[in-house]
Image (spheres, grey):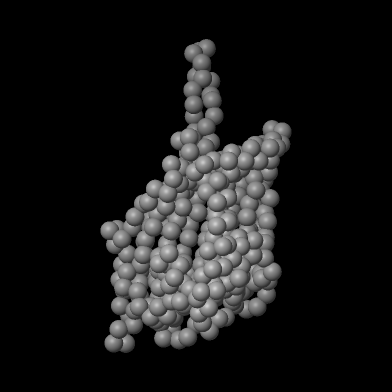
Amino acid sequence: MGSAAAAHAQNEPIKFGQIDAKDLTAAPFAADSAAGAVVLCDYGRSRLVGYRDGFRVVFERVTRVKILKKSGYDAATVEIPLYHRDGDQEQITNLRGFTYNLVGGQVQKTKLDATGVFLEKRSPRVNVRRFTLPDVREGAVVEYAYTLSSDFLFNFQNWVFQGPYPVRWSEYRTSIPVFYKYKIIYQGNQPLAVDQATTGSTNLMVDRKVDSGAGIGTSNSSLNIAAPTEQHQWALQNVPPLREEAYTTAAADYEARIDFQLLGEQWPEQEYRDLTDSWAKINARLLADDNFGQQLARGGFLKEQMGALAAQHPDPAARAAAVRQA
């Protein structure tokens, strides 16, 4: 592990609102000279948090991108899908963002306004939180951060290291109580700059029934317990953009990413409970859902459309513009 990677392994690689002025003046890493933007840092952290009504996956993200050309303006527009079903949901909190421009030698900061954030209904069970960072120009740096809470434990937040733009640093950390067992799947041929597993601890709030005394019955009581955790940290450095030809099929088949599959759970003094069958049934139900899986299945039409666009617009910038106008 190099010194830069080692330093990142010790500390969080990015702090929201604390921009390095050099990112506005110096040419950052770009694996592709034709790139319209470069991701300076993409950092995410997921953990399981216990509440009185159960566990939730809490995912926090901070992303910073430098806009190099007009063809990279779309990097300032972000869409976050949110799933909900049968009373369970995913929701966004603490959403914030800034755009930084160098004007007259001074850093000018423009805040993401609430009026620029929208919630769009894509289907009966999928909403999309959409926003565009303001005052985007060539040479600008944009950053955003948010927290996503999910009731769907079987769908632990995945992480994608690679996309349409080169990435200088992408890092993902997780903290999972040992009571839950997940299968962790890394896909891609990009070498990991950081790949660490450690142990830690967290406080969980659980409900228990206690005897009320005098034969009256039982009542619910909350209890905070310390639980050991398995902590993981992965990072990729200087990641090239996903080649355009990959987008003619399913990009997820080629990108560097980490996915999680819930295998089971085992609480103290209890037998191990295999959840793979339950997970498979939930997954099958989602894929059969007219408003979720079948929409994904219909995504094959993109292969034909993107193939036609590639033939019609050999220039990547012109092709990107054609996609936005389609």
Q: How many marks?
A: 0
**Given the current orientation, which residue lies at the most extreme top position?**
215
Q: Residue at x 58, y 56 (%)?
A: 300
Q: Residue at x 49, y 29 (%)?
A: 221
Determine if residue 75 is in view. Answer: no
Q: Position of residue 213 (x, y in %)?
A: 51, 16
Residue 138 vs residue 286: left or right? left
How far from the left and from the top, in percent, is residue 88? 48, 39
The answer to which of 263 and 116 lies nearer the viewer is 116
* Residue 288 spot, x, y in % from top left: 58, 41
User: In the rendered image, which quarter is residue 269 located in?
Assistant: top right
Quadrant in which the C terminus appears: bottom left
Compared with residue 291, is residue 235 higher up or lower down, i.e. above or below?
below
Q: In the figure, is residue 63 to the left or right of 3?
A: left
Asked if 278 appears above or below 99 in the picture, the reply is above
The N terminus - image quarter: bottom right
Q: Quadrant of residue 167?
A: bottom right
- Residue lying at 65% horizontally and 48% vertically, measured from the top left: 261
Residue visible at 52% across and 45% down?
292
Q: Is residue 284 visible?
A: yes
Quadrant of residue 75 in the image?
A: bottom left
Looking at the image, is 8 positioned above or below residue 121?
Answer: below
